[in-house]
Image (spheres, grey):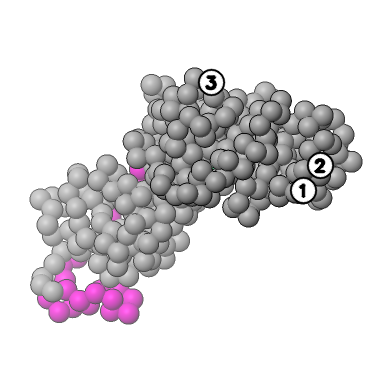
Amino acid sequence: MATGTLTIDLDALARNWRALDSASGAQTETGAVVKADAYGLGAGRVARRLAQEGVRRFFVAVAEEGATLRQALGPGPEILVLGGHMRGDTDMIADLDLVPMLNSIDQLTRHFEALPGHAFGVQLDTGMNRLGLEPAEWAAVREIALPRAPRLVMSHLACADDPEHPMNAAQLALFRDLTDGIDAPRSLSATGGILLGDAYHFDLTRPGVGLYGGEPFLEADPVAWLSVPVIQIREVQEGETVGYGNGWTAPRDVKLATIAAGYADGLIRAASRGGALAFSRGQACPIVGRISMDLITVEVGGLDHEPDSLDLLCAEQTVDDLAAAAGTIGYEVLTALGQRYHRRYRETGA
Ligand SMILES: *Cc1c(COP(=O)(O)O)cnc(C)c1O
């Protein structure tokens, strides 16, 4: 088999959720964000394991994701749709028991007209200017929305990955201003907000990336492990060039391995210039030349053995290390991991 193997450690996922649940505090429920196919790792398997751990509320981006998730989870767990109630979603929301987070007056009107009595939540904008009712809109509709008992009233922090950022306290103050005294459960924090402390936790937290082993949850256990088979090994003489555009010239005689993954598998081209490495039994090997669509060349002469495969996500190189090499964030590396890998779920139940 010449495709890489992406191993998804469901036990590590469960440990990360338990750690974030405990950081959220005993008074606060901890949900899970499984949008974008659980950040690329497989929403069905991820959500089923988290449900076993005790997660009762799952967040997705759009109703279609909610529909897929309902098939995987069955009835019971609450599935909240961050994108709200869009035109064309009504049947899915009703039939699969999804809870749209209503983001605008249009969405409120649509929901209350199409599905009176059906569960909903409300998303408020506290400064990010991405999704949610503005404070003035909320003032206009809160007496219509609140008597219908929203399942959740939430907002989202723009700068929670930077604890020093003044935006955090400003959004917290506005959220309290908009929601203090209401009966509905409240939620403000994703992974970053959980780490900001108790004042940010309210009734429910909504971690995503921290579950999957990414920053800003620095204590996270890695969840995604990627190993790619070596297709060919060759000797290259000093002065010979490697890859598209003659991107790399051998500074001395070297031994190169060509491995079977590339940018079509989410291994971002910029990572090779940014110093991404490949590993064999924990020993580092530099990536040389350009990353191509399906192939990467790696200098392996420094190893004390001939490798059958090389690791790109491993203890020595995390999702965030690979992201830093590519000039991006761990979220993008995770969600870019393609569909071509053989996916293996590791689970002992521990
Ligand atoms: C993506 C998202 C989350 C999860 O954020 P992480 O930073 O991955 O923990 C929570 N809430 C909303 C509204 C989101 O869009």
Horizontal and vertical percent position of residue 52: 52, 22
On the rendered image, what quadrant is the C terminus found in?
Answer: top left
Q: Does the beta carbon at disc 3 come under 8 Å from ligand 1?
A: no
- What's the magenta bit mostly, secondary-structure-wise? strand
The residue indicated by pointer 1 is 137
Look at the image and give the residue range highlighted in magenta. 225-250
| Residue 226 sits inside the magenta stretch | yes
Please tell me how many numbered marks the rendered image carries: 3
Q: Are marks 1 and 2 in contact (CB under 8 Å)?
A: yes
Q: Nearer the viewer, residue 209 or 157?
A: 157
Residue displayed at 80% across by 48% down:
105
Amino acid type at image mark 1: Glu
What is the secondary structure assignment of the residue under circle 2?
helix
Q: CA distance from mark 3 to mark 2?
A: 29 Å
Q: Are marks 3 and 2 in contact (CB under 8 Å)?
A: no
Q: Is residue 217 visible?
A: yes
Q: Which mark is residue 223?
A: none
1 or 3: mark nearer the eye: 1
Q: Considering only order in the chain, which callout, 3 or 1, is on the residue closer to the N terminus? A: 3
Q: Viewed as shown, does residue 287 lie left or right of 305? A: right
181 shown above or below 308? above
Q: Are marks 1 and 3 in contact (CB under 8 Å)?
A: no
The residue indicated by pointer 2 is 141
Q: Considering only order in the chain, which callout, 2 or 3, is on the residue closer to the N terminus? A: 3
Horizontal and vertical percent position of residue 330: 41, 50
Amino acid type at image mark 2: Val
Horizontal and vertical percent position of residue 32: 54, 34
Amino acid type at image mark 3: Gln
The residue indicated by pointer 3 is 27
> Which quarter of the figure has residue 75?
top right
What is the secondary structure assignment of the residue under circle 1?
helix
Q: Nearer the viewer, residue 250 or 173?
A: 173
